[in-house]
Amino acid sequence: MGLLRNFSILLLLACASHQMLLGSHRRNHEQMVTKDKSVCTWAATGEDLVLLNVTCKKNGRSFSCEYSARPALCTHFTSNEELYWKQISKALKKHKNLCKDSSRLVKAGMCRGSPKEAHFILFPVVLMKKDIPASAGTAVSSCISENKKLAEEYCIESWSSFCTFLFTMIKDSDC
C-alpha cells in the first residue's frame, strides 16, 4: 500500500509539473440553455488541439461529451479570441442535439472558409461519456466530482481521467 501511495504521489507531481510546463489555456462559460432546452456549461482546454468539454442536464438526466478542433487554423482566431469564444458559445446554444449529432460541426462565424479541422466536431460516440441519472448516488457523485476537480487542477487534460481514478483509489475507500 505504501508503494502505491508513493507511486501515486510521484505521478501527481509529474502531472502537475507537466501542466505547468505546457501552460495550457482554459476557457470556461457560464450556464446556457440550448434550443432543445438542455441546461449546459462548457470548458475548453488546450493550445493547438482544443478540447471542448460540454456538460448538460435535461429532464432530470445529465450527459456530457467532448468536441475537438484546431482553432489556430482559423486565420481570425489569434487576432480576436474573445469574439471567437462568444461565437462558439452562440453556436452551442443553437444546437438542438448537443453530444448526439456527430455530423454537425460547431463553428464560429468568423472562421467561414477555414479547414474542417478548425471547427469543433464531436468525438466519436465510443469515447463519449454515458448518460447518468441526475439523482444517482449523490455521495458517490460528490466524491467523484471532488476528485475530478483535483485531477483537472493538477493534471493535464489527457491524464485527468487517470488522475481522477488514482485520487478515488487513494482518498476514498467508500467511493
Image (spheres, rainbow, N blue to C red):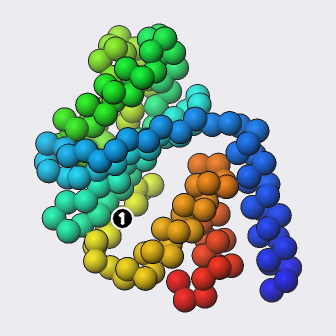
Q: Is residue 49 visible?
A: yes
- Estimate the x, y position of residue 70 in percent, counting from the top left: 50, 27
- In this view of the protein, which residue sits in the foreground, 169 or 102? 169
Amino acid at pointer 1:
Lys
Residue 18: where, in percent of width, then height? 75, 46
When the figure is inspected, residue 3 is found, relative to residue 88, above or below; the finding is: below
User: Which residue extends farthest bottom?
Assistant: 174
Going 66% across and 54% down the picture, which residue do you hit? 155
Q: Could one spot residue 66 in this view of the protein? A: no
Q: Residue at x 43, y 75 (%)?
A: 141
Q: Give coordinates of residue 21: x percent, y percent.
A: 76, 38
Q: In the rendering, at what x and y percent does residue 135 appear? A: 28, 77
Which residue is at 16% across, 64% downward? 59
The one nearer the camera, 149 or 8, is: 149
**Number of numbered discs on residues:** 1
Quadrant for residue 149, please give it. Answer: bottom right
Q: Residue at x 61, y 60 (%)?
A: 151
| In-image side of 137 versus 104 (left or right) | right
Name the residue carrying label 1. Answer: 130
Under circle 1, the secondary element is loop
Q: Residues within 10 Å of mark 1 (few under 14, many from 20)?
A: few
The answer to whether 173 appears left or right of 15 in the picture is left
* Residue in the foreground of this view, choosing between 71 and 24: 24
In this rendering, position of residue 137 left or right of residue 16:
left
**Quadrant including the N terminus:** bottom right
**Residue farthest along the front direction in this orientation:** 30
